[in-house]
């Protein structure tokens, strides 16, 4: 797969947005755990948001595992690339499996 638009503003925008949203999801889940530990009531109206953020974090976690597994074959550091892929999502995997990038390294 050749990513012609790898450096486009769309990829950059999605990377930034994904990083902000995953960081927010981590903060939201931390707040939810804190509230559960301290017996603080969380509004029920936030339940759909909690399920969406848990689904997104699970997907990003699986993408991070895949990136860590395949990173050594592309001469990348597994832990570093897994963290990067966890925060940026599918774009990290696209960059990892980009044929042009792998052939020039």
Image (tube, rainbow, N blue to C red):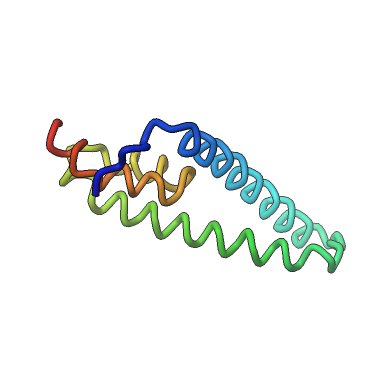
Instruction: Return the residue nearer the eye: 57 or 6.
Output: 6
Residue positioned 61% across, 40% down in the render: 20
Residue positioned 54% across, 36% down in the render: 13
Instruction: Return the residue nearer the eye: 72 or 4.
Output: 4
Total of numbered circles in the picture?
0
In the image, taking residue 73 as reference, residue 34 lies left or right, namely right
Q: The C terminus appears in which quarter of the rendering? A: top left
Name the residue furthest front.
4
Image location of residue 55, percent across then percent down: 57, 64
Name the residue furthest left.
103
Image location of residue 101, percent across then percent down: 21, 36
Residue positioned 76% across, 62% down in the render: 36
Whether residue 72 is situated above or below residue 38 in the rendered picture: above
Quarter where residue 100 is shown = top left
In the image, taking residue 23 as reference, residue 58 lies left or right, namely left
Whether residue 35 is situated above or below residue 96 in the rendered picture: below
Whether residue 21 is situated above or below residue 77 in the rendered picture: below
Image location of residue 11, percent across then percent down: 46, 38
Image location of residue 47, percent across then percent down: 76, 67
């Amino acid at each position: 797969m050749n990513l012609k638009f790898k450096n486009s503003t769309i990829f950059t925008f999605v990377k930034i947005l994904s990083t902000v949203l995953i960081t927010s999801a981590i903060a939201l889940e931390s707040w939810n755990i804190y509230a559960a530990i301290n017996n603080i009531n969380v509004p029920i109206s936030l339940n759909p948001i909690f399920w969406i953020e848990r689904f997104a974090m699970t997907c990003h976690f699986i993408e991070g595992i895949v990136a860590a597994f395949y990173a050594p074959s592309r001469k990348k550091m597994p832990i570093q690339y897994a963290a990067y892929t966890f925060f940026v999502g599918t774009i990290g995997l696209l960059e990892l499996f980009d044929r042009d990038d792998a052939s020039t390294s």
